[in-house]
Amino acid sequence: MDWTMFFVVTTFALYIGIAIWAKAGSTDDFYVAGHDVHPTVNGMATAADWMSAASFLSMAGLIAFLGYGGSVYLMGWTGGYVLLAVLLAPFLREFGKFTVPDFVGDRYYSNAARLIAVLCALFVSFTYIAGQMKGVGVAFSSFLGVDFNLGILIGMGIVFVYATFGGMKGVTYTQVAQYCVLIFAYTVPAIFMSMIITGNPIPQLGFIGNAAGEDVAMLDKLNKTVTDLGFLEYTSTNKSMFDVFAITGALMFGTAGLPHVIIRFFTVSSAKNARVSAGWALVFIALLYTTAPAVGAFARINFIDSVNEATYIQDGVDYEAEAAAIAADGGKPVPQWYKTWEKTGLLSYDDKNGDGIMQYRGPNAPDGIENEVVPNRDIFVLANPQIANLPGWVIGLVVAGGLAAALSTAAGLLMVISSAVSHDLCRRTFFPEMNDSTELLVARFAAAGAVVAAGLLGIFAGQLGFVAQVVAFAFGLAAASLFPIIFLGIFWKRMNKEGAIASMVFGLVSTFAYIYYFKFGGGTPDQYLFGVSPEGIGFVFMWAAGALGIVTALVTAPPPQDIQDLVEDIRVPGTRQPHGEADAGMAPMPAE
C-alpha cells in the first residue's frame, strides 16, 4: 500500500504540475495546443489518448478468459488505428477543421448536419468515457481501500484540474507523462511473469515459446489446463466467425470515427507532420499491444494455479495463522490477493458443495463439479503482480499505470465534449459574434460540466459490463454514425448534406437502439441480427448507413461546385488555402 500511495500521489502531482505549467491562454492553446506540438511528442500523447482503460485494464483480462475470442479487441483496435492514420487523418488535417462536427458542417455546408454530428460526437464520447471512469473506480477501490464510487470522484477531481486549466495544451503534455507511466507499468510486470512462466525475459517471445523447464509450448500447456477444467481451448472461441468479423470491423471503423483521436492530428503544424505523428503513435502503441496477448495468457495460468483447489479462509479469521495451518497440513490456502480483491465485490466465491475448497471449473468440467469462483476480467492486469508475488513497488507502479491510461483518454474525450459545446454549438452555430475570451470561458465551463457527467456515467457503467465491452459500444456508434460521412466526405465529392444527415441519423439511432434492446430491453442472443452481438452491430449498420447516404445523395441535388472543388483540393497536400475564413481564435493551417 505504501508503494501504491507513493506512485499514485507522485504521478497525480506531476499531472497537475504540468497542467499549471501549460495553462491555456487562448482558444488556440485550449483546443489544439497552438498547432506547434512536435510530431514525436504528439505521437506519444496520441498513444496515451488511444490506449485507454480498455486497453490497459480490460483487454488483457478479456484475452485471458476468452482466449482467441478476446483477440477481436486487439485486432480491431490495432487495425483501426492504422486505418485512421493512413486513410483519414492527413486529409482531415489538410481540410483544417479541428473537430469532426466542424468538418461536417463545412464539408456539407449545413448547420443541421453540424448539429447532428455534435450529437453523434457527444453520444460516442460519453459512452467511451463511461468505460474510462469505471476503470478508475476499479483501480481505486482495491488499492486505496476506498469505495468504487468514491474512487471515480477522486479521478474526476484530477481530470478536472488539468483539463479545465490546461486545455489541449495541458492535456497533451500530461498525456506524454501518462504514456511513460503506463507503458513502464505494463511491461515491467510482464517481463517478471514471462521469466517466471517461460524463462524468457521478452514477453512476446515467451508467449510463443515453451513453458519454463519443460519441452512443451506454453500455449499447448495452457490449452490442456483449461480443457481439463471444462473450458474451451484457449486458442478457440465459441463466437461465430461472422460475429468475430463484425466486432473486429466495428472496432476498426469506429476508431476511424473517434473524435478524440482525430483532434490530436490538429496539434501539429501540417498534414505532413500529422503523418509522421501517426507513425510514431503506432510505434508507441505497439509496445503495449504486442505485450497484451502474453499478459492475458500469463494471467490465466497464474489465476488457475493460485485459486483452484485452495481452502477458503472465512472473513474474521486470523488469516496468517489459518493459512499457515492449512499449508502445514499439506493443503493450499486461499491466497491473500484473493481476499484483498474480494472486498471490492469484483470477485465472488459460492461454496456450492460446502467443502470449503474453491472449485474453478468450466461449463463442461469432466469431473462434473460446478464452478464456484467468478472473477471480474477487468481486475487482472492490476491483480497480476499480486498473483505472481511480485515486489510491492511493481504493484504500486501498475496501479499508477492503470490510472494514467484511464485518465489520459478521459481527458482527451473531455476536450472533444468541451469543444463540441463551446466551439461547434456556441460560436459556430448559435452565437457567431462570440469573442475569443468568452469562448475560452465557455469551453472551461463545458469541460467542468462534462467531468461531472462523466463521473456519473462511470458509476452507471458498472451495470453495463466490462470496461472493454462498454468502450466497444462507443466504437460501434462511431462506426455507424461518423465514419461513413467522414470517409465519403473526403473521397466522394458528390456526397451532399441530405445524404450526410440521413446517414448519421440512421447509423446513430439504429446502433443505439440495438445496443439498448439487448443490454436493457430483454433481448436474448438467439434474437441477434445475423448472429451479431451488440459489440459488433455498428459494423453492420455502418454499411447500411453508408448505402442510405449514397442513395439519398444521388436522388437529391449535388453539392455546390466550390464544395466539390474543395474535396478535390484536400487530397493534394499543401495545395489549398484554409476553407473560407479561419475560425476565430484559430491560426490558419500552414502549407507544407
Image (cartoon, rainbow, N blue to C red):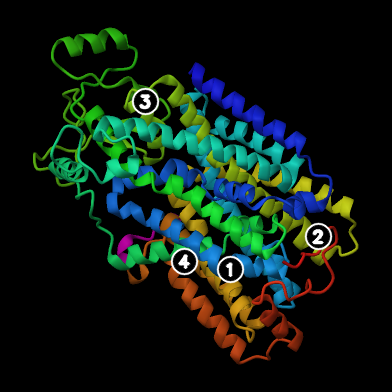
Q: Secondary structure at mark 4?
A: helix
Residue 248's image quarter? bottom left
Q: Is residue 70 magenta?
A: no
Residue carrying label 3: 386
Residue located 54% across and 44% down the image: 132
The amino acid marked with disc number 4 is Gly
Q: Earlier in the sequence, mark 3 or mark 1?
A: 1
The amino acid marked with disc number 1 is Leu
Residue range of the region highlighted in magenta in the rendering: 520-527
- In front of the other: label 2 or label 1? 1
Q: Secondary structure at mark 2?
A: helix
Q: Earlier in the sequence, mark 4 or mark 2?
A: 2
The image's mark for residue 426 is 2
C-alpha separation, residue under disc 3 versus residue under disc 1: 42 Å
The amino acid marked with disc number 3 is Gln
C-alpha separation, residue under disc 2 versus residue under disc 1: 27 Å
Q: Earlier in the sequence, mark 2 or mark 1?
A: 1
Q: Answer few, some or many: residues within 10 Å of disc 2's Cα (few below 14, many 20 plus, some between 14 and 19).
A: some
